[in-house]
Amino acid sequence: MVIGAGQAGLSASYFLRHYGVEHVVLDGAPGPGGAWQHRWPSLRLGKVHGIHDLPDMPLGKPDASRPASEVVSEYFEAFELRNSVPVKRPVRVMAVRENGDGRLLVVTDKGEWVARAVVNATGTWERPFWPHYPGQASFAGRQLHTFDYNGPEEMTGKRVVVVGGGASATQALAEISLVGASTTWVTRQPPIWREGPFKEQDGRAAVALVDERVRAGLPPVSVVGVTGLGVTPDVAEARARGVMERLPMFDRVVPDGVTWDDGRHVRADVILWATGFRAALDHLRPLHLRAPGGGILMDGTRVVLDPRVHLVGYGPSASTVGATRAGRAAAREVRDLLAKRAVSAA
Ligand SMILES: Cc1cc2nc3c(=O)[nH]c(=O)nc-3n(C[C@H](O)[C@H](O)[C@H](O)COP(=O)(O)OP(=O)(O)OC[C@H]3O[C@@H](n4cnc5c(N)ncnc54)[C@H](O)[C@@H]3O)c2cc1C
């Protein structure tokens, strides 16, 4: 069983079929595209870090001015059709439990399945992370997360505070600053810009760092986060306009804006929390997979505490390139696990 039909789940399904493992893919989304189908329309393909190819089906060179959500959804749909991916949607997995016979019981909003192994590929989109700051509830304006962001139009004429040091924050700042009355950027750490093109060795070093964390049972940090902030043309242009002058995190939210303990005050109509996402793994809670460090102890894609469970698109494989590779690794391990069980049952 594969849970989730984003890049990671589709790749896992492709390789499970390649290795002759019968399976089904349960996906909670309304249509193909994984998290990409939810991305805001102004996120054009030319603005994203890059979409890695799904197995044996190159994305090619689509029109970079089209919304990434449309391009990726069409690409995933074509992949599903071409490979007859056994996907069922919308089916939301609520819990994965012991079935009592060595198999796993997968409880969904459309009934129950029993599986010998689960490749979990549920991504992060459905778990937006909102940090807590004093006074947040007192704010008289609008607060929203990247999850709810629909593009700059709704910020026209507004004073906007953007919180967060990742690519979602810089992309939003670049476009909101063209229509808003003002923008203010606050981050916990000073930004580290990645000037020039993305280098393969930087990506590898970032993946190694996250891999080390999950092997120690610590919560992962985002791979995309440790590669530094890419300077896309629109971000470069916004930097030249002085939009990317960052302030340290404010100390509290007040009804008309945000304040710092040193007396600084910025008025705001909107606070955009571009503060990232966490792995959407609540449905695995009944399996008690968490290590004392708060993360899940991993060996590659395999959960150390339960080899029937693989996590793809998690930790070191939480990028489109990593997700595709992890799908293959998980499929191979599941094949080997089932073969071992078949031998010991004979
Ligand atoms: C704004 C933004 C921009 C990004 N840009 C890039 C980029 O340019 N390059 C890059 O490499 N990465 C980027 N990322 C990270 C990117 O999301 C991942 O690299 C990759 O797309 C995730 O693929 P996935 O298959 O792991 O998850 P997803 O694409 O999130 O797919 C998960 C699927 O699982 C389903 N699901 C979730 N929970 C359940 C459940 N309980 N039951 C059933 N189904 C469920 C979801 O509906 C979804 O269809 C970006 C992330 C964000 C937020």
Image (tube, rainbow, N blue to C red):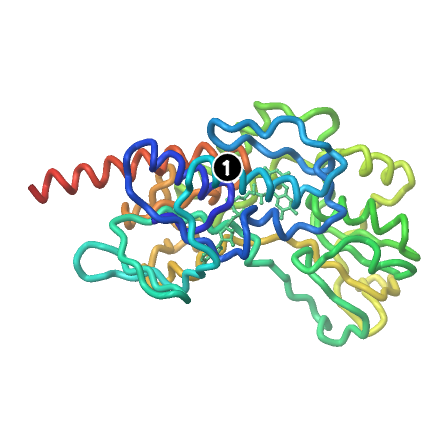
Label 1 SS = helix
Quadrant where the C terminus is found in the figure: top left
**In the image, what residue occupies the spot 44% across and 43% down?**
9
Is 344 located above or below residue 112 in the figure? above
Look at the image and tell me whether residue 230 can be seen: yes
Is 132 located above or below residue 298 in the figure? below
Circle 1 crowding by C-alpha within 10 Å: few under 14, some 14–19, many from 20: many
Is residue 329 shown left or right of residue 342?
right
**In the image, what residue occupies the spot 37% across and 34% down?**
15
Q: Position of residue 281 (x, y in %)?
A: 44, 56
Is 227 located above or below residue 288 in the figure? above
Choose top left, top right, bottom left or bottom right for residue 161: bottom right
Q: Position of residue 126 (x, y in %)?
A: 55, 58
Is residue 126 shown left or right of residue 87?
right
Is 318 located above or below residue 156 in the figure? above
**In the image, what residue occupies the spot 41% across and 37% down?**
327
In this view, the residue farthest toward the left is 346
Is residue 197 shown left or right of residue 78?
right
Look at the image and tell me whether residue 316 can be seen: no
Nearer the observer, 37 or 317: 37
Is residue 176 shown left or right of residue 278?
right
Nearer the observer, 305 or 31: 31
Q: Position of residue 276 (x, y in %)?
A: 62, 52
Q: Position of residue 222 (x, y in %)?
A: 56, 43
Q: Amino acid at mark 1?
A: Phe
How many numbered dots are placed on residues in this image? 1
Q: Which residue is mark 1?
A: 79
